[in-house]
Amino acid sequence: MSVSICELHHITSLEQFYDELSRQLQLPAHFGRNLDALYDSLSADVSGPFEIIWRDTEQSRQQLGADLYATLLEILQSVAAERGDVTLDIHH
């Protein structure tokens, strides 16, 4: 079984974050573009296995703000911890 790869580069806004995940992981049409819906979609709607590679995270943290960046990272880490078929790779 092949692994879907989602590569995030130079994320500077929440909308861009949602856009890239939606495009690369083919989030469902009912994805509500909010943090709760993000968690729900990644944990239940996206077929695995998949890997999320987030590059340039220091730049993203500065652009998004430390709180939003931490929240997004926590959601991704939670999904990876709960699902055996999801990998998260963070690059500063």
Image (cartoon, helix red, strand yellow):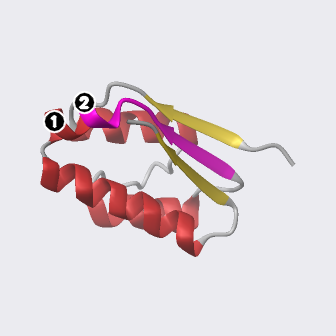
Quadrant (top left, top right, bottom left, bottom right) of the C terminus: top left
Instruction: Name the one closer to the observer, 53 or 27.
Output: 53
Tell me where residue 14 sits by quadrant: top left
Place of residue 75 in the rendered image (x, y in percent of width and height, measured from the top left) = 37, 63
The image shows residue 41, relative to residue 25, as above or below, that is below
Tell whether 3 sits left or right of 7.
Answer: right
Secondary structure category for the residue under label 2: helix
The image shows residue 64, relative to residue 80, as above or below, that is above
Place of residue 72 in the rendered image (x, y in percent of width and height, measured from the top left) = 31, 54
Question: Furthest-right residue in view?
Answer: 1
Instruction: Name the one closer to the observer, 8 or 23.
Output: 8
Q: Is residue 63 magenta?
A: no
Place of residue 12 in the rendered image (x, y in percent of width and height, measured from the top left) = 22, 30
Mark 1 and mark 2 in contact (Cβ < 8 Å)?
yes
Place of residue 85 in the rendered image (x, y in percent of width and height, measured from the top left) = 70, 62
Residue range in magenta is: 50-59
Tell me where residue 82 sits by quadrant: bottom right
Question: Furthest-top residue in view?
Answer: 10
Given the image, on which type of amino acid does mark 1 rest?
Gln
Marks 2/1: CA distance? 5 Å
Dot 1 alpha-carbon crowd within 10 angstroms: few under 14, some 14 to 19, many 20 or more: few
Residue at the spot 56% in from the left edge and 37% down from the top edge: 6
Q: Is residue 55 magenta?
A: yes
The image shows residue 19, relative to residue 81, as above or below, that is above
* Residue 59 image label: 2
Question: Furthest-front residue in view?
Answer: 92
Q: Which residue is mark 1?
A: 62
Residue at the spot 33% in from the left edge and 25% down from the top edge: 10
Given the image, on which type of amino acid does mark 2 rest?
Gln
